[in-house]
Image: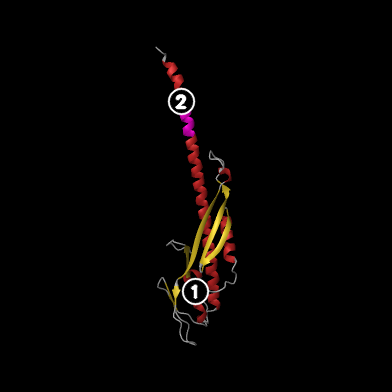
Amino acid sequence: MIPPYRDAGQAFPIYLTVVAGLLFLALAYLAVGQAAVNRSGAQTAADAAALAAAQDERGQLTDQWVKALRDPTRWPDIFDGKVMLDNPDHPCRRAGQLATENDASLGHCFAPALLKYQVDVTTNKTVGRSVVPGSEKYQSTAHATAEVQRRCWFKLAAVGAELPDLACKDGKVWHLRPDDTTGLPKPEDLFDVHLANSPVNEQ
């Protein structure tokens, strides 16, 4: 009859193998979690950068509308984004600033269509050392697109007539007068800014 302690001795290496395997799996799951956090950070930075670019264009369009207040014939092109911005490079500079604030770097930033900006960002941080080879060099990338959409509409009146009223989404009607530039609509009154395919407006 074999003494019981020999069975325990034979089981010990198996126990160590199982524990080592479980430890490896735990570290692998940790690496996956770190990668997921890194990707989430990249997407947050991309979203913020795209929104910043679109918000900058919204502000510039509003400034142009205020300057053209007494000439309603110029309004349609402004509201449709068919005008040259005073600072056409600034929306992407703002995008770069927001990417930096979110610990990422801006790759591409461009307008694939009127009133729309697309950005690519890369995280500054890597996933870090883990049991997954190469993870210490892996940086996450993400893409985002933001849109500017008009909130107000108007009907052009005859030349020399009073300025047309602005009828906006929230039911607000702005009665404008060429001799009164106080209390004019703000950028967020005239345009919505949101991520593409997102129903939630970002002010």
Residue on which the image places disc 2: 14
Above or below: residue 113 compared with residue 41: below
How far across and how far down the image is residue 126, in percent?
57, 47
Q: CA distance from mark 2 to mark 1?
A: 72 Å
Task: Name the residue nearer the viewer: 174 or 195.
Answer: 195
Residue on which the image places disc 1: 79
How far across and how far down the image is residue 192, in percent?
47, 67
Q: Main secondary structure of the magenta part?
A: helix
How far across and how far down the image is residue 11, in percent?
44, 22
Above or below: residue 203 compared with residue 185: above
- Segment tinted magenta in the rendering: 14-23
Three-letter amino acid code of the residue under disc 2: Ile
Task: Name the residue nearer the viewer: 165 or 8.
Answer: 8
Above or below: residue 104 compared with residue 185: above
- Using a 10 Å C-alpha cutoff, classify the residue at mark 2 as few (fewer than 14 neighbours), some (14 to 19) or many (20 or more): few
Task: Name the residue nearer the viewer: 122 or 166.
Answer: 122
Q: Residue furthest top?
A: 1
Three-letter amino acid code of the residue under disc 1: Phe
